Amino acid sequence: MSCGDVSLVPWQILKNSVNNCLSIPDNDIPLSVAMLAKGYFGDDNIVAGECSAPALISINVSCNNEQIKKDLELDMNSNVLLIGCEGDTDIKLYNELLSKGSEQLSNG
């Protein structure tokens, strides 16, 4: 969640109830922020900050890796809930990410 370190309080709960976990790098966050903002995934534009984008990155990585798909039992019948826990709470950072991600989109 873009925090650098594991938050120990929620980790105590999650470690006993989560079957799988992914760690992703920050370098895909701008692209994901821009794709959400520009409506790439539906009819609505979604304002999602740096802590919301990892959910999208995680499902994208998972669906494009056969071993992860198998481990998570992901297929065409799967239902996946993605949680985005913030919008543009830091306007300056959001605009920087959106600008960088928009540039990545336009460069293809």
Image (tube, helix red, strand yellow):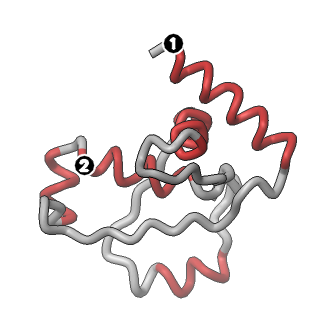
The quadrant of the image that shows the C terminus is top left
Q: Position of residue 60 (x, y in %)?
A: 35, 46
> Is tag 2's residue or tag 1's residue first in the polypeptide sequence?
2
Residue type of the residue flagged with mark 1: Asn
Badge number at residue 32: none
Rendered view: 30 above or below 74: above
Give the residue displayed 66% in from the left and 52% down from the top.
47
Q: Mark 2 or mark 1: which is in front?
A: 1
Q: CA distance from mark 2 to mark 1?
A: 24 Å
Q: Position of residue 65 (x, y in %)?
A: 22, 43
Q: Secondary structure at mark 2?
A: helix
Q: Secondary structure at mark 1?
A: loop
Q: Position of residue 61 (x, y in %)?
A: 33, 45
Q: Is 51 or 41 nearer to us in this picture?
A: 41
Rendered view: 73 above or below 104: below
Q: Is 36 or 69 nearer to us in this picture?
A: 36
Residue under label 1: 107
Give the residue displayed 51% in from the left and 23% down from the top.
105
Give the residue displayed 48% in from the left and 46% down from the top.
24
Badge number at residue 63: 2
Give the residue displayed 35% in from the left and 54% down from the top.
59
Give the quarter of the image for residue 5.
bottom right
Residue type of the residue flagged with mark 2: Cys
Determine crowd level at label 1: few under 14, some 14-19, many 20+ residues with C-alpha closer than 10 A.
few
Rendered view: 32 above or below 83: above
Contact between labelled residues 1 and 2, with CB atoms less than 8 Å apart = no
